[in-house]
Amino acid sequence: MRLRAFGNTDLQVSELGLGCARIGGIFQGDTSSFVRLIAVARDAGINFFDTADMYSQGESESLLGRAFGTERSRVVIATKAGYALPQRRRLAAALKPVLRPVIRAFKLRRDRLPSSARGSLGQDFSPAYLVKALEGSLRRLRTDYVDLFQLHSPPLEVVERGEWEPTLEALKRSGKVRYYGIACDTLATGLAAMRYPGVSSLQFTFSLLEQKALEALLPQARSRGVGSIARETLGNGLLVKDSAEIDFAKYCSSAEEMEQRPVQLAELRSLAAQRGVSLPRLALDFASHSEGVSVALVGARTPAQLRELLDHFPS
């Protein structure tokens, strides 16, 4: 897998990166499978691993730390902070060894739990919280620095106020953070983030189904030397699933989307067939090779899923 420059930084990143939101968690099975998944990614040439302190209540970071303890310098680890876990989820994190066998025995599923059992997420981008969050991430990752520290889905007004900038600059000077960036939920947030010269990266949704960043964000990021991380490159699974398997109500947030998505997918399948490639390959090719994209994230729950996905990647 080819390496690329990551904006104006000195980082060299693989064309594809592993999004680690699905790694860990009491509903996801044996932790050894996740370690093998990370190994499959590394053996395939992936060196960019994107995680967050909230993913699986910190277990995603812990598993990366376990996997890369002896080869830390060979990988680029990006993490995020800004979400504050409710007490229920912090308690679940502490009780994971006890809860896992119970969940397996009763075949419990996350999507069938009432929202009251999960608790609601809050956000905190205060200097004290960001420093504390980074220290926790460093412990779990078993490292004394992260290559990229990102604000996790900050609201536009938080980015515009810029109260986070002095804190991230101080963490960078300390050596605990090599570079910092913003994981954006909207294009407006990404554009606002680029007003700050210290921002080295943007992360945003980008796929065959969501192409707005192609004109609205990528050209400016490229011209400013800001690294671009494309996420949800497979449309949250829509671009790899068979049409008969898709419950569009779970993937669409509006009646308009419910109407558009089946049409879009039919057109994209037709285009892939015309080009003699699979739809996943067409999707990965688009996300990873659009001008300005530094790294395109893919996600998987098992080693087999990741191997199957990588088989589609144009080498």
Image (cartoon, grey):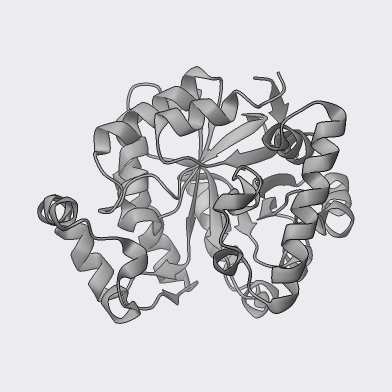
Q: Residue furthest front?
A: 244
Q: Is residue 68 visible?
A: no
How many numbered callouts?
A: 0
- From the top left corner, tell me how far across and down residue 204 is, in percent: 68, 56
- From the top left corner, tell me how far across and down residue 245 is, in percent: 55, 51
| Residue in the picture at 41% in, 61% down | 131
Q: Relative to 45, does residue 182 appear above or below in the rendering? A: below
| Residue in the picture at 52% in, 56% down | 170
Give the camera-side residue of 296 and 310.
Answer: 310
In the picture, measured across the screen, residue 129 lies left or right of residue 16, that is left
Quarter residue 272 falls in: top right
| Residue in the picture at 31% in, 58% down | 57
Q: Relative to 173, does residue 44 appear above or below in the rendering? A: above
Q: Relative to 173, does residue 120 appear above or below in the rendering? A: below
Q: Is residue 155 visible?
A: yes
In the picture, measured across the screen, residue 67 lies left or right of residue 252, that is left
Give the camera-side residue of 18 and 164.
Answer: 18
- From the top left corner, tell me how far across and down residue 146 is, in percent: 47, 42
- From the top left corner, tell me how far across and down residue 208 is, in percent: 77, 49
Quarter residue 283 falls in: top right
In the picture, measured across the screen, residue 128 lies left or right of residue 274, that is left
Give the camera-side residue of 148 and 214.
Answer: 214
| Residue in the picture at 64% in, 19% down | 1
- Quarter of the picture containing the C terminus is top right
